[in-house]
Amino acid sequence: MLKNHFLGLALFIFLTLASSGCSRQAWYEGVKEGARNNCRSQPPGEVEPCLIKLNTKTHEEYEKERSGTK
């Protein structure tokens, strides 16, 4: 089961990156989606707390924070 989930996630990330030219933004969004999928595979009582902890910044917000610009 876990192996199938991992393969599905890897395929999703690959297709996302392939369709967008492997930009940094695509990598960023792919990782965020993978984290959301990981939360959704948790036991029922742990899904919501896991989703709450996730990064919700857009790629633009992340880049601005990373570069120190406002």
Image (cartoon, rainbow, N blue to C red):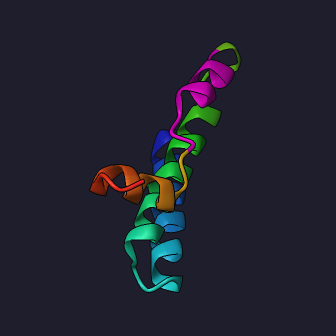
Residue 51 on the magenta span: yes
Please give the name of the residue rendered at 30% of the width and 52% of the height, measured from the top-left corner. Answer: 68
Q: Nearer the viewer, residue 56 or 3?
A: 56
Give the number of callouts.
0
Expressed as whole percent of the image width and height from the top left, the position of residue 14 reads 45, 72
In the rendered view, would you say 20 is above or below 58? Answer: below
In this view of the protein, which residue sits in the foreground, 53 or 17?
53
Is residue 7 something that shows in the picture?
A: no
Q: Main secondary structure of the magenta part?
A: helix
Magenta span covers which residues?
46-56
Figure quadrant of residue 39: top right
Task: Kindly indicate the quadrant of the structure image that contains residue 42.
Answer: top right
Q: Against 8, is 22 above or below? A: below
Residue at the far left: name it.
67
Q: Is residue 16 above or below residue 36?
A: below
Residue 20, x across and y down, in percent: 50, 82
Whether the magenta-drawn stretch holds residue 27 is answered as no
Apparent side of residue 44 relative to residue 32 in the rendered image (left or right): right
> Which residue is drawn at the image coordinates 54% and 58% (left, top)?
8
Counting from the top left corner in percent of width and height, residue 64 is at 40, 57
Outermost residue on the front side: it is: 70
Query: In the image, residue 22 lies at what x, y percent?
Result: 39, 79
Q: Is residue 15 visible?
A: yes
- Residue sitting at x 62%, y 30%: 51
Q: Nearer the viewer, residue 9 or 55?
A: 55
Residue drawn at x 45%, y 46% is 3
The quarter of the picture where the N terminus appears is top right
> In the image, is 46 to the left or to the right of 26?
right
